[in-house]
Image (cartoon, coloured by chain):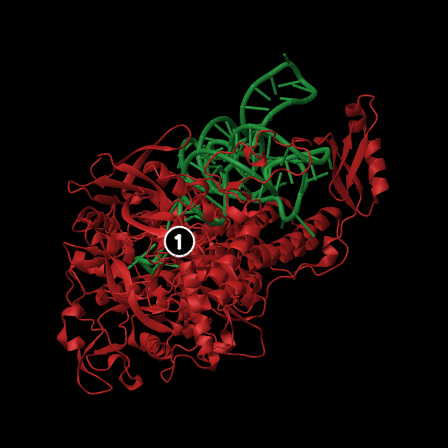
Amino acid sequence: MDAQYRPEIIEPEAQQHWEEKQAFKASEDSSKPKYYCLSMFPYPSGKLHMGHVRNYTIGDVLARYHRMKGFNVLQPMGWDAFGLPAENAAMANNVAPAGWTYSNIDYMRKQLKSLGLAIDWSRELATCKPDYYRWEQWLFTRLFEKGVIYKKMATVNWDPVDHTVLANEQVIDGRGWRSGALVEKRDIPMYFFRITDYAEELLSELDNLPGWPERVKTMQKNWIGKSFGVEIHFPLTPTSPQGSSMLPSPASGRGAGGEGQSDPVLKVFTTRADTLFGVTYVAVAAEHPLAQQAAANNPELAAFIHECKQGSVAEADMATMEKKGMDTGLKVYHPFTNEPVPVWVANYVLMGYGEGAVMAVPAHDERDFAFAQKYQLPIKAVIKPLEVKGEGGRGKGEPPTDPTLHPSPFTLPYTEHGVLMDSGNFSGRTSQDAIEKIALVLKNLGLGDRRTTWRLRDWGISRQRYWGCPIPIIHCPTCGDVPVPEKDLPVVLPEDVKIDVGSPIKKMPSFYECTCPKCGGKAERETDTMDTFVESSWYYARYACPDLDKGMLDGRANYWLPVDQYIGGIEHAILHLLYARFFHKLMRDEGLVDSNEPFANLLTQGMVVAETYYRDLPDGKKQWINPADVEVERDDRGHIVAAKLIADGQPVVIGGVEKMSKSKNNGVDPQALIDQYGADTARLFMMFAAPPEQSLEWSDAGVEGAHRFLKRLWKMVHEHVEAGVVPAFTGGELPENLQGLRRQLHQTIAKVTDDIERRKQFNTAIAAVMELMNALGKVDATDELARAVKQEALEAVVLMLAPIVPHICRILIKALKPGSCLVGSAWPQADEAALVQNEVELMLQVNGKLRGKFKVAVDAGKEAIEAAALASPELQKHLDGQSPKKVVVVPGRLVNVVV
RNA sequence: GCCCGGAUGGUGAAAUAGGUAGACACAAGGGACUUAAAAUCCCUCGGCUUCGGCCGUACCGGUUCGAUUCCGGUUCCGGGCACCA
């Protein structure tokens, strides 16, 4: 064994050894429990960033740990290879997206391999390869025929100068990122997955996922957004006073967009039907038929509707923009009072949600209140707070001035539930009760009913982009939309293209000209591609059988699925994880998998964030500058106060801390770190810096410490081995100091095991090993017995660190136990006998403040502990002659004496 | 705007089920070794203090014998918001 720790030599050697031995190749083996450990696959953006290192190290620690615990482990890797950045890079550098992507993959694969991950590389896949996406197209055609996929119009961001559809990311302050033109909303036909058909199951099955973080489940629940409410119809013409029998029957199912004869009622959905008597106007979306109708002979209104079409479709933009509206002059009639209610067009009402119309109750809704004040619309209060039962203002700590607990006065808008007033027959009822009754009466009148709605919308997957999976549909003038027959799949995306503005395949007759598979007539192929979320919704299953060319999945998928541990960034908590869950259920219903859910356990790692820097360019755009090229100036408290570009010494603007991303150019390349210190140091530091779920602001301070620890470990093992290896201690009498050391060793094994397996908190596991090493360094190990205990401890230390820093541990374990190999080594087990303790130290508190410590036998009862506490001299000192009022005894912890 | 998180020394953090606040590290300061430097090792390291203690986990309030932990409110920061992945 070398006296020096030389990662630059031992790391490539270890990696080559594992590769030659195919040490991590996985196969189906029913003799062992399986453990499928999956980290979210990377987008091949060019280089690894710190988030990748964090993600894949966490996955590797868990994979290697379970391998040592005797599991049959699968840890695969692949590439989420389609996507927008390849097209942007292509435009910027005049290269084809395919070539750019493949060379990025090659570089990043090399980087990943230099991290020493225990990956089965034989299963590697890339979503941009036809042998992958052909099965996505195959499933698409089946789902299209089944009706799970359908076509409808949807709104996109349109750049009127570049004549392209823009991603939300490409809209900056309402303008196209390249053209600078004001973005418009435009409706185009798109294909949709009926994810809403699965809303109920996607919601209820969250309760069957105990291995998922609560916060992710809460986010998904809120996203799916099941709400119980009432659909209310406002007739377009006044009804005769007695006249519910005269009412036209409820809408015949024709869409609201049908020309000519429109619905005789305006439908709205509300969760607050109890406020119905407080309605002072209704608001409709700019695209609503009523708005269009009113605009026909009202140029001012038409201009306003046109204005509403400006801006991006992103919900965040819609929700934060200034709320504007205009009266259409039209009236609808209140379903109960028959009073006329003005119809307004408002930019905050979305055609895509519910009915594209809302009833407005300014007295009891924040947004309606602000809108009514702005346009001086009437405000009518119909809900008052519930009066406090019994006499008011009694009891301790009851805040006497809380307005919501008082019957009057209360301030508007009052948005809580309460008691109805000025609401006809319903006055005096509670909100809950009134919602039921109002729904019932509306139903009897034929003017509404209870309804369950979902916030979740169907998943639109058409993208007007080039670098994606072609949608396998042929448009025939006689047969309509025809799915490409299985024998003609895959529809291959041409890779040898030139990119300028717009998708090249839309201008490529050799791609889109074809014949109809049904009638043989001239037809055109669809040129839109699929949302890249579709590829990432099923890759985890394909890893089970990446070589299969006769189908999408085979029985191997059911051996490996569900994924036992999925690891990825918290930013994917909703979209990716929801789509993958949905897709799994689609595949289940196609008979491709047996399970209901794809991921049994989920670990959402916090983001690696970094400071952003930029300069404003003359054309109003921002030039993002990498933190590595910037020198910062800090104040006494360590906060960054100024920054300049190293290259020219001129100042740059500090943009704030954000997740590392390509678009903000704030990713820190880990390569320098790996080159300088080695992969083990990078891995150790990443795992030690913070617990995995917490976000981590990148700083390279502290890396030295991780490296120093590895050098100390190397030195300690080296010195021990040089003096001759001995058989590890296995049992027998020990002097007190060695017994204490051995207790600490086995406590550490128990803690590290728990930290990795249950808590998945690697930083405290490492800290515990460091403490043990500190104790080990203080032991004078000259006699045989002490050396045997030290041997036992060093073997355990090396094995416990092996999942985190495998390269160094491979050498160290071979030195400690000649002939052994790391990949076949088992995880150490805590020896219960070594954990036994006779005495424990308890804390002594007086009035909750720490005043002393005392020792008792580990099995002492409550009375004995209390007696020992009362007898302690520290207590007498702090009692100051007073007698204890109360004594709280917490065995194993403390005694609190209250005086 | 809405949904979900977070905030603890100069810094990263620990405290696992309401029970010793600051483990383990980094940085800094001091010392040993050395001709010197690097490396290594040792010590100090939340604030105030009349040296008895007192204060302190973003802020305000509550529950409790006891709150970093639970509850109500506030501020700031991060993530997501359906075409970034």
Q: Can residue A693 be seen in this view?
A: no
Residue A314 picture location, percent across and down? 31, 52
Q: Which hue is chain A drawn in? A: red
| Residue type beneath disc 1 | Gly
> Between A138 and A290, which is closer to the camera in this rendering?
A290
The quadrant of the image that shows the C terminus of chain A is top right
Instruction: State the image quarter where residue A505 is shown.
Output: bottom left
Report the label total.
1
Residue indicated by mark 1: A51
Where does residue A63 sit, x and y in percent of width and height?
Answer: 50, 64
- A882 over A76 or under it: above or below: above
User: Relative to the observer, which residue lies in front, A607 or A240?
Assistant: A240
The chain drawn in green is B
Query: From this viewpoint, is residue A839 visible?
Result: yes
Q: In which quarter of the image is residue A528?
A: bottom left
Q: Which residue is drawn at 42% across and 46% down?
A: A279
In depth, the one of A512 and A824 nearer the eye is A512
A61 relative position to A489: left or right: right
- Side (left or right) of A374 relative to A837: left
Q: Where is residue A698 in the image (x, y as percent from the top left)?
A: 40, 45
**How would you rate the neighbour count of disc 1 (Cα within 10 Å): few for under 14, some for 14-19, many for 20 or more?**
many
Identify the secondary structure beneath mark 1.
helix
Asked whether A638 or A440 is in front, the reply is A440
Relative image position of residue A722 (x, y in whole percent): 56, 55
| Label 1: chain letter | A
Q: Residue A533, relative to residue A658: is it above or below? A: below
Q: Is residue A690 above or below residue A31?
A: above
